[in-house]
Amino acid sequence: METHIITLTFQECGRRYGLAPDDLRRFVDFGLLSPSSAPDTVQVEEPDELLPRLARLHHELGLQPEALDIILAMRQRMEQLQAALAQEVARARQLESFLQGRGPLLDG
C-alpha cells in the first residue's frame, strides 16, 4: 500500500479538522507532526486518519502532546501486533492443512 505525504496549511487544518495554529505548533514542536519548508504548514501521511484523531484526543479528552505521543505509539504497536498475529494465524492454518493431508506436498 502506497502512502503519500501531503502538505497542509495551518488554516486548512483548522478548517478541516478544527485544530488551532497554536495546537499545530505544539504538535510540530513535540514531533507529532512534521513541519514543511513553507511557514505555517505541516507535512502529513494519511491526514484524514491522523489529524481527526489528534483533534479528537486533544479537544474531547483534553490530552496534552506528551500523552498523544504515547497513545499514537501504542496504537501503532497494536496495529503491528495485529498484523503479526494475522500472519501467524495464517501460517498455523497452512500447517494444520498440510498435516491433515489437505495442503500441498513439496518434493524433497
Image (spheres, grey):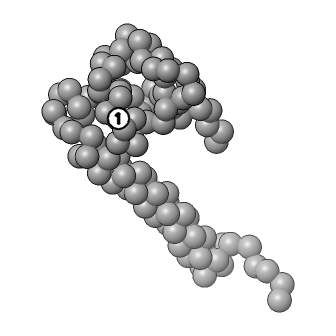
Residue 90 in sight here: yes
Quadrant hosting residue 17: top left
User: What residue lies at 76% left-to-right and 79% top-to-bottom?
Assistant: 105
Q: How many marks?
A: 1
Q: Where residue 27 sits: x, y (%)?
A: 35, 35
User: What residue lies at 51% left-to-right and 68% top-to-bottom?
Assistant: 88
Compared to residue 22, the image places residue 29 above or below, namely below
Compared to residue 27, the image places residue 89 above or below, namely below
Decide which of 49, 106 is in the foreground and name it. Answer: 49
Relative side of 104 to 93, left or right? right
* Quarter containing the C terminus: bottom right
Relative side of 96 to 13, left or right? right
User: What residue lies at 59% left-to-right and 76% top-to-bottom?
Assistant: 95
Decide which of 87, 106 is in the foreground and name it. Answer: 87
Residue that badge 1 annotates: 27
Q: Where residue 6 sits: x, y (%)?
A: 57, 26
Q: Residues within 10 Å of mark 1 (few under 14, many from 20)?
A: many
Decide which of 104, 16 is in the foreground and name it. Answer: 16
Which residue extends farthest bottom?
108
* Quarter containing the N terminus: top right
